[in-house]
Image: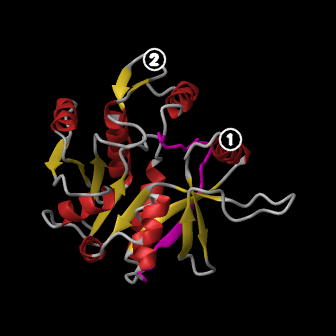
C-alpha cells in the first residue's frame, strides 16, 4: 500500500496559539519544537511500515513551514480555508498518490510507531474500512489525568465509545462512558487517523456538523453523516501517550521524554 503520513499543523490554535513551535526539552537538554518532535515520531512510524511511507508537514503558515524545512521535513503548503487537520489532509490527498493517508497530528509527539502500523494493517485487512483510528484503554495514570483536567475546567484528551464490531458510537472531550463505582473501562481516543482518499474527498464536501462544533472534534463529521469510523485497540507497551493540548501539558511531555531518555 502506498502510504503518506501527513502532519497537519496550524499556528492559530484558539487554546494555544503558536503551539506547533512550542519548545520541548528532551532528556539530554536538547530543545526542539513540537512540530519537529511530531515529525520524528512520524519518521519512526514510516520506518516501521513494511513498505515505508512518505512524511509531509501540511501547513498554511510560513513560520511553521520555515522551521519544518529547517530540520529537513517535506512541506506542503495548504489553504488557509482548511478548518481542521482532516480538511488539510483532504487537500493534500488530492495532490499526492496514496492508497492510505495517515493523519499524525502535530501535537502528538508521543505517538508510538505501532499505533500507525495497526491502522494501516486494519485498512489492508478490510477494504470496507474507510477511516480508522486507534483507541487505548486508559490506565490509572491516564484516567486520573483526564479527570484532573475536567475538574480544573481544562479540555484535555478525548474518549471513545465503540460498538461490538469496532465502529465508533461517539467521541467526546468528556470522560465517557459513565462509570459505576469500581468500574474503570475508559478508552482514550488517540489523535491519529488513517483514511482512504475517497473518504477524505467526501469529508471535504460536507459542512461541519453541530456535534463537531460543540465538541470541537473533527472526526464527528464522519459520524454525523453516516460514515463509520473503525476504532482499532492498541497497547501502550509501557509507553505513556498524551497530546499537547494545553500549555500545562508541556511539563507532562517533558517528564515522559526524561523518563524514556528521549533527547
What secondary structure predominates along the stretch shown in magenta?
Answer: loop
Question: Where does the image place residue 42, in percent across and percent down from the top left?
Answer: 34, 46
On the question of residue 3 being in view, the answer is no
Q: Which of 122 and 254 lies nearest the eye of the viewer?
A: 254
179 up-or-down from 130: above or below:
above
Q: Dot 2: few (<14), some (14–19), or many (≥20) neighbours within 10 Å?
A: few
Q: Which structural element holds mark 2?
A: loop
Q: Which residue is mark 1?
A: 148
Per the rendering, the mark at residue 213 is: none
Residue 37: image x %, image y %?
A: 37, 35
The reply, left or right, for residue 242 in relation to residue 164 is left
Mark-to-mark CA distance, 1 and 2: 29 Å
Q: Residue furthest top?
A: 29
Which of 136/87 is in front? 87
Q: Is residue 257 left or right of residue 99?
A: right
For the C terminus, the image quarter is: top left
Q: Is residue 244 magenta?
A: yes
Q: Which residue is mark 2?
A: 28
Contact (CB < 8 A) between labels 1 and 2?
Answer: no
Amino acid at each position: 500500500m502506498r502510504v503518506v503520513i501527513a502532519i497537519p499543523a496550524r499556528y492559530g490554535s484558539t487554546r494555544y496559539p503558536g503551539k506547533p513551535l512550542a519548545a520541548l526539552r528532551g532528556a539530554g537538554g536538547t530543545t526542539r519544537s513540537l512540530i519537529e518532535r511530531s515529525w520524528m515520531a512520524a519518521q519512526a512510524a514510516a520506518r516501521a511500515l513494511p513498505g515505508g511511507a512518505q512524511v509531509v508537514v501540511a501547513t498554511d503558515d510560513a513560520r511553521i513551514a520555515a522551521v519544518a524545512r529547517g530540520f529537513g521535513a517535506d512541506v506542503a503548503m495548504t489553504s488557509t480555508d482548511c478548518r481542521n487537520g482532516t480538511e488539510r489532509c483532504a487537500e493534500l490527498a488530492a495532490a499526492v498518490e496514496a492508497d492510505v493517508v495517515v493523519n499524525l497530528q502535530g501535537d502528538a509527539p508521543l505517538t508510538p510507531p505501532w499505533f500507525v502500523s495497526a491502522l494501516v494493517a486494519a485498512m489492508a485487512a478490510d477494504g470496507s474500512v474507510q477511516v480508522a483510528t486507534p483507541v487505548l484503554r486508559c490506565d490509572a495514570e491516564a484516567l486520573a489525568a483526564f479527570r484532573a483536567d475536567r475538574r480544573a475546567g481544562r479540555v484535555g484528551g478525548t474518549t471513545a465509545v465503540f460498538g461490538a464490531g469496532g465502529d465508533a458510537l461517539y467521541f467526546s472531550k468528556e470522560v465517557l462512558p459513565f462509570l459505576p463505582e469500581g468500574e474503570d473501562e475508559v478508552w482514550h481516543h488517540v489523535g491519529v487517523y488513517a483514511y482512504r482518499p475517497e473518504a477524505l474527498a467526501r469529508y471535504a464536501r460536507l459542512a461541519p456538523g453541530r456535534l463537531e462544533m460543540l465538541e470541537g472534534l473533527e472526526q464527528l463529521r464522519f459520524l454525523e453523516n453516516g460514515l463509520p469510523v473503525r476504532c482499532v485497540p492498541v497497547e501502550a507497551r509501557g509507553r505513556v501517550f498524551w497530546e499537547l493540548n494545553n500549555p500545562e501539558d508541556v511539563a507532562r511531555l517533558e517528564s515522559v521524554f526524561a523518563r524514556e531518555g528521549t533527547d
